[in-house]
Image: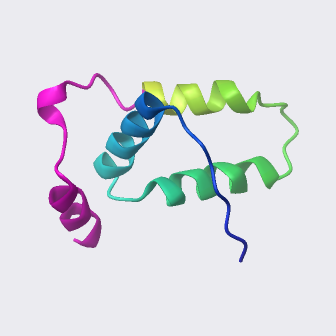
Amino acid sequence: MKNLTLSLDDEVYRQARIAAAERGTSISALVRDYLQALSRPSSVVIDPAAALLATLDQAGAFRAADRLSRDEAHAHHAA
């Protein structure tokens, strides 16, 4: 297995962290699943950026008050 380092805008990272916590997973798992989906053969051409944005759109609206603390995010992932 290979490791990958990404640089993200702070807001993109925040939204990804929230989306991952809501799904009970990690940002790494979200990215891994997304990249695995790209590697599957498909008869339909999918725009990767559009697919990622559609996935994030399904996460719904976020408010600052909904933000999880670090401990809450890790406890939710461990459950």
Q: Please provide percent x and percent y for residue 16.
A: 43, 40
For the view shown, which residue lies furthest in the left direction? 65
Quick one: quadrant of the C terminus?
bottom left
For the view shown, which residue lies furthest in the bottom direction? 1
Quick one: quadrant of the N terminus?
bottom right
What residue lies at 84% left-to-right and 31% top-to-bottom?
45
Taking depth in this image into account, of 15 and 30 the one nearest to the observer is 15
* Labels in figure, total: 0
Which of the 4 image quadrants contains residue 76? Answer: bottom left
Q: Is residue 36 left or right of residue 17?
A: right
Q: Is residue 64 left or right of residue 57?
A: left
Which of the 4 image quadrants contains residue 7? Answer: top right
Report the colour scheme.
rainbow
Q: Is residue 21 left or right of residue 40?
A: left
What residue lies at 52% left-to-right and 52% top-to-bottom?
30
Q: Please provide percent x and percent y for residue 47.
A: 76, 27
Q: Is residue 43 left or right of residue 71?
A: right
What residue lies at 72% left-to-right and 72% top-to-bottom?
2
What residue lies at 66% left-to-right and 24% top-to-bottom?
50
Boundaries of the magenta span: 58-79
Q: Please provide percent x and percent y for residue 68.
A: 18, 46
Q: Is residue 64 magenta?
A: yes
Q: Please provide percent x and percent y for residue 61.
A: 28, 22
Q: Looking at the picture, does residue 70 appear above or below residue 53?
A: below
Q: Is residue 59 magenta?
A: yes
Q: Looking at the picture, does residue 2 appear above or below residue 53?
A: below
